[in-house]
Image (cartoon, grey):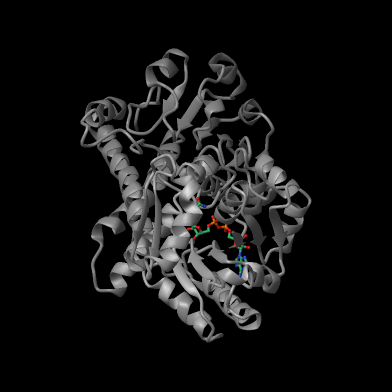
Amino acid sequence: MRITMVGTGYVGLVTGTCFANLGNEVTCLDVDPVKIDKLKAGISPIYEPGLDEMIARNVKAGRLHFTVDKAAAYASAEIIFLCVGTPSDARGHADLKYVLAASGDIGDAIEAAGGETGGDPGERRAKIIVVKSTVPVGTNAKVREAIAAKTGKPFRMASNPEFLKEGAAITDFMKPDRVVVGVDDEHGTGGRMRDLYEPFVRNGHPIYVMDIPSAEMVKYAANAMLATKISFINEIAALCEAYGSNVDEVWRGMTSDARIGNKFLYPGLGYGGSCFPKDTLACVSMGSESATPTPLLQAVHDVNQRQREDFFAKIVKHFGGESNLRGKAFGVWGLAFKPGTDDVREAPAVTLIEKLLAAGATVKAHDPVAHETARELLGDRITYCDRPMDTARDADALLICTDWPEFKQPPLERLRETLAAPVIFDGRNLYKPAVMEEAGFTYVSVGRRAVNAPAAG
Ligand SMILES: NC(=O)c1ccc[n+]([C@@H]2O[C@H](COP(=O)([O-])OP(=O)(O)OC[C@H]3O[C@@H](n4cnc5c(N)ncnc54)[C@H](O)[C@@H]3O)[C@@H](O)[C@H]2O)c1
């Protein structure tokens, strides 16, 4: 099929490349000429394991193209996927400005091109506009209106929320747990979407075709559930700290109950990234707009915000007050919001570094892949180190913000000798408190006893 992906971010670029990899003719469109120039030069603007090779292979095969030319990209497509960002606006609502701007462009293109694919004369079917961005219920209807305002020619709509995870995006998309498609004509549009996804669901993974409002809600419900799990375990971790329980033991005892399961229940600095924070808030906004209170999801958000505050408070407490952070040097391991990605949007590391800098501390940080993206937010206010150990040199404490595998078994003796003071604040619970105690560290983590910490007062 001839497909145009609108937006070459984490979703559009990965899914477009995967569609091309199965033989489709894919054009990736973006309004950012820098991204498109990079892609044309064979450089991926994002880090995603396996993506560079897959892009190169499909470009070489002539199936994957990059462009800023909207009219051409829309005119040639049978299926157009909207994959533009839907960030939170100032009130926490999903901001639809990119979605609606692209919809207007699509309307213009359909009007100019005639509204049908123009391909095989036996197959003159209207274009399908698929909303893949995460959007509030009712957005497909707004997209339809925005396009219809520009053209009276036929087109079809579908909702197809995306569930890929950054860091495992290719595998998630190629072997999805499920594909969700919302349509208002089950056989026509539904049938064409089933055909498109058939190779992805061959291994028995289901494709669920449903009405559009339900498909739109599935994505929010899934992300709200995952965010809830994280805030839940973080709240339990706080109780563990208050009562001297060890959250690792509590986790073991609790998650062996098959009804609970052990996925996505790790205590830490809370969730970040470009999805959970904004999608949880968007659910709360949908609730207030429809006079449907969502106190649970508001609490999920509040707990997540508090998690970072509480962790910073532990640092402050260790140094005997925020004013004592002035002039202190911190090493930071991990900038990305999670391992496997260079995405630093809403990353706990960024929040904590901003707080340290505001208090007058200095920061040297290392992340295996996220220096460039972090520099866009933090500029040269921190030092970026090529090796983790370089951040520790002469530092008054080390702060661990992302659970990259390479941080899991550091040479503890060398680390202790490199730090000016053997103090670690571990926001990801990478090490066992007893091991760190034995190794002579002051070690503060989440939901477990702090070891070798100076006595209170
Ligand atoms: N990142 C994820 O892990 C993930 C997973 C599932 C769903 N989603 C959802 O998918 C959507 C996209 O997320 P993302 O992380 O890929 O965003 P992103 O910010 O990485 O990329 C969006 C891209 O769209 C481009 N763009 C904006 N307006 C455009 C227009 N009119 N025409 C063409 N391009 C345009 C931007 O330049 C940018 O490159 C969001 O709604 C998000 O919630 C994201």
Q: Is residue 234 visible?
A: yes
Nearest the eye: 404 or 418: 404
The N terminus: image quadrant: bottom right
Residue 51, quarter of the rendered image: top right
Q: Is residue 6 visible?
A: no
In the figure, 104 relative to 397: above or below? below
The C terminus: image quadrant: top left
Instruction: Specify whether 148 is left or right of 446.
Output: right
The image shows residue 324 at horizontal and vertical percentages of 51, 40
State the residue at coordinates (44%, 35%).
427
Nearest the eye: 3 or 137: 3
State the residue at coordinates (62%, 68%).
120
In the figure, 58 relative to 144: above or below? above
The image shows residue 441 at horizontal and vertical percentages of 47, 20
State the residue at coordinates (60%, 79%).
110
The image shows residue 40 at horizontal and vertical percentages of 76, 54
Residue 8, quarter of the rendered image: bottom right
Q: How many marks?
A: 0
Q: Which quadrant of the picture is home to ligand 1?
A: bottom right
Residue 382, quarter of the rendered image: top right
The image shows residue 223 at horizontal and vertical percentages of 37, 52
Instruction: Specify whether 333 is left or right of 376.
Output: left
In the figure, 127 relative to 223: above or below? below
Nearest the eye: 27 or 163: 27
Nearest the eye: 103 or 341: 103
In the figure, 47 relative to 287: above or below? above
